[in-house]
Image (cartoon, grey):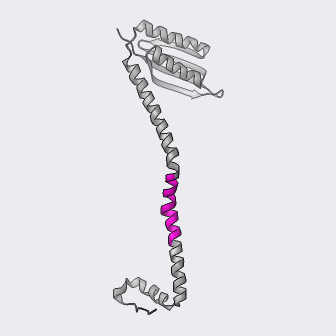
C-alpha cells in the first residue's frame, strides 16, 4: 500500500494530526482498526436504527388491537348517544317519576332533591357497578344527563358525593 501525504486539499486542518497518526500505523494495524470501526458502526446502527424499528413492528399488532377495541367502544357510545338524542322528550312528571324510581332502587345509598329541571342526587357508599347501572337507567328512563359530579372513592370501594342532573323534559 502506498501512503498519500497529507495536503491542505485532502481535508480539514483539524484532521491532519489524525491522518498523520493513521499513516504511522502498520497496514495490519490499520486493517484491524478499520474492521473494529466498522463493527462499532454496525452495532451503533443496529441499536439506534434497526432494533427500534423491529420492536415497533413486533408491538404493532397488539397496539392495533387495543386501538381497534377503543374505536369500537367509541363507535358504540356514539351510536348510543345518537339513539338517546333521537328519543322523544318526556313530560316533566314522567321524567321525575322515572328518576325517583331509579333513586328508590338504590335505597338508603341515595337521596334526591329536585330544583326545577335539575336534580341533585346525594350518594353514599354506592359500588361502582351499581353506580354505572344507575347512570344508564337515569339516562335512558328519565332522559337525565349528568351536569356536574363531585364524587370520591371511599374505603369500601364505593362512591360518595353529589351528582347534579339535567332533565331533558318537553311539552
Magenta span includes 55: yes
Q: Is residue 126 above or below residue 95?
A: below
Total labels drawn: 0
Residue at horizontal 48%, vertical 10%? 98
Q: Is 69 placed left or right of 128 in the picture?
A: left
Image coords of residue 109 (percent x, y): 60, 17
Q: Residue 166: horizontal and vertical position, in percent?
A: 42, 18
Q: Quadrant of the C terminus?
A: top left
Image position of 164 (left or right of 13): right
Quadrant assignment, res 36: bottom right
Q: Please, which residue is most extreme toward the top here?
A: 93
Residue in the picture at 57% in, 16% down: 110
User: Is the stretch drawn in magenta largely helix, strand or loop?
Assistant: helix
Q: Is residue 69 above or below residue 33?
A: above
Percent from the top left, x then y, of residue 90?
40, 10
Q: Which residues are magenta?
A: 41-57
**Does residue 61 belong to the magenta stretch?**
no
Residue 152 position by quadrant: top right
| Residue at image point 44% right, 92% down | 3
Which of 65 and 161 lies nearest the eye of the viewer?
65
Amino acid at each position: 500500500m502506498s501512503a498519500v501525504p497529507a495536503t491542505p486539499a485532502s481535508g480539514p486542518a483539524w484532521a491532519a494530526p489524525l491522518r498523520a497518526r493513521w499513516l504511522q500505523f502498520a497496514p495490519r494495524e490499520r486493517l484491524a482498526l478499520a474492521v473494529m470501526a466498522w463493527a462499532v458502526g454496525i452495532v451503533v446502527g443496529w441499536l439506534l436504527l434497526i432494533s427500534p424499528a423491529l420492536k415497533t413492528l413486533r408491538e404493532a399488532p397488539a397496539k392495533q388491537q387495543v386501538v381497534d377495541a377503543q374505536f369500537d367502544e367509541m363507535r358504540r357510545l356514539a351510536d348510543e348517544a345518537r339513539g338517546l338524542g333521537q328519543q322523544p322528550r318526556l313530560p316533566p312528571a314522567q321524567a321525575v317519576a322515572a328518576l325517583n324510581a331509579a333513586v328508590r332502587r338504590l335505597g338508603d345509598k341515595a337521596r334526591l332533591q329536585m330544583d326545577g329541571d335539575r336534580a341533585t342526587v346525594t350518594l353514599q357508599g354506592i359500588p361502582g357497578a351499581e353506580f354505572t347501572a344507575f347512570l344508564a337507567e337515569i339516562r335512558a328512563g328519565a332522559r337525565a344527563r349528568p351536569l356536574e359530579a363531585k364524587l370520591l372513592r371511599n374505603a369500601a370501594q364505593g362512591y360518595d358525593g353529589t351528582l347534579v342532573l339535567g332533565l331533558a323534559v318537553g311539552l
